[in-house]
Amino acid sequence: MARMQIVAALYHFTRFPDPAALRGPLLQLCTAQGVKGSLLLAQEGINGTIAGPRAGIDAVLEHLRALPGCAALEHKESYAEDMPFGRMKVKLKREIVTMGKPDVDPVARVGSYVAPQDWNALIASPDVALIDTRNDYEVGIGTFEGAVDPDIRTFRDFPKWWEEHRDEYRGKRIAMFCTGGIRCEKSTNYLLGQGINEVFHLKGGILKYLEDVPAEQSMWNGECYVFDGRVSVGHGLVPGDFDSCHACRRPISAADKLHPEYERGACCHHCVNEYSETDRARFRERQRQMDLAEARGEKHFSD
């Protein structure tokens, strides 16, 4: 019988002079504690999501909070009936969330945090422009009422979008949100650097809002995409109804699977023109291996 897994999403901006030196001990600890998932290390801090038993998650969090500048590291917890990750990865990156703006520094300053219980009142104000900082496929399955969708493929595209549309928001207070809060740390710092004085962001991100705000009081519509095997969550952080295309990783619904372009494990209507036949053959073989593993009563992870 599968044990309930604790899923911990976390990030923390600090200054690591030598992130490579932190990688080995962290990976070793996670492996020893039965913790799986993905953590990114860079000179600007740490970011990622991990899952495992209660004792293992607690041991990893204790280790992380003992790192230089990480005593105040916060995390958000949810639960999964099965392990949502296939293995543990600790990667070294230039940025823990890629914006491509070297001058952006969340350690220096960020926008004003707004608690989930105060968020509805803020975004209902007529002088507030609400901007979703997530990628297009994330916005596509859920967002806040009245939110602006920049329609970006990656977070790196956000500065260009802002530069093209900034005049539309003159005289407005800006409120921004993302899944767990990390993108808003950078996007609010960026807008402050662009001369926008009143910038707000949702503390703890959508995940904290869905955890704390009752569904009957919510201004959230749809589900929230998460970067693990659950694919999406709803209010109370209950796993949602979306699956993931094994080719492009975008979320797909039951209705999406009825599209003629959909091929289980190999293609969906989003990515039908994005891959070569060689890629498709590889995806089909991966799906075949997953089916064989399932027939043996095993899990096959392709991450």
Image: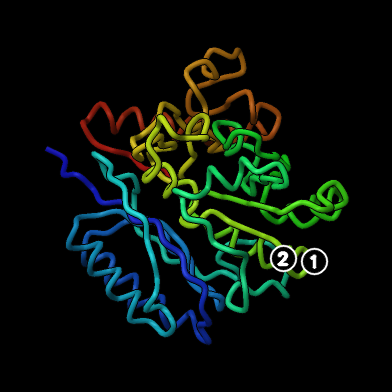
Q: Is residue 81 above or below residue 99?
A: above
Name the residue that disc number 1 marks.
194
Q: Quadrant of the N terminus?
A: top left
Q: How is the image coloured?
A: rainbow
Residue under the image location 76 percent in, 70 percent down: 193
Label 1, residues with CA under 10 Å away: few <14, some 14-19, many ≥20: few
Name the residue that disc number 2 marks.
190
- Label 2 near label 1: C-beta < 8 Å? yes
Residue under the image location 56 percent in, 19 percent down: 262
What is the secondary structure assignment of the residue under circle 2?
A: helix
Residue under the image location 44 percent in, 46 percent down: 209
The image quarter in which residue 44 lies: bottom right
Depth check: give the residue in front, 282 or 1.
1
Determine whether, in the image, residue 277 is placed left or right of residue 120: right
In this rendering, the count of numbered labels is 2
Q: Amino acid at mark 1?
A: Gln
Relative image position of residue 292 (x, y in whole percent): 31, 29
Determine whether, in the image, residue 198 is placed left or right of residue 233: right
Relative image position of residue 6 (x, y in whole percent): 26, 51
Q: Amino acid at mark 2?
A: Tyr
Depth check: give the residue in front, 156 or 165.
165
Determine whether, in the image, residue 95 is placed left or right of residue 117: right
Relative image position of residue 176 (x, y in whole percent): 63, 51
* Residue 236, numbered circle: none
Q: Is residue 193 above or below residue 296?
A: below
Residue under the image location 66 percent in, 62 percent down: 188
Determine whether, in the image, residue 6 is placed left or right of residue 207: left
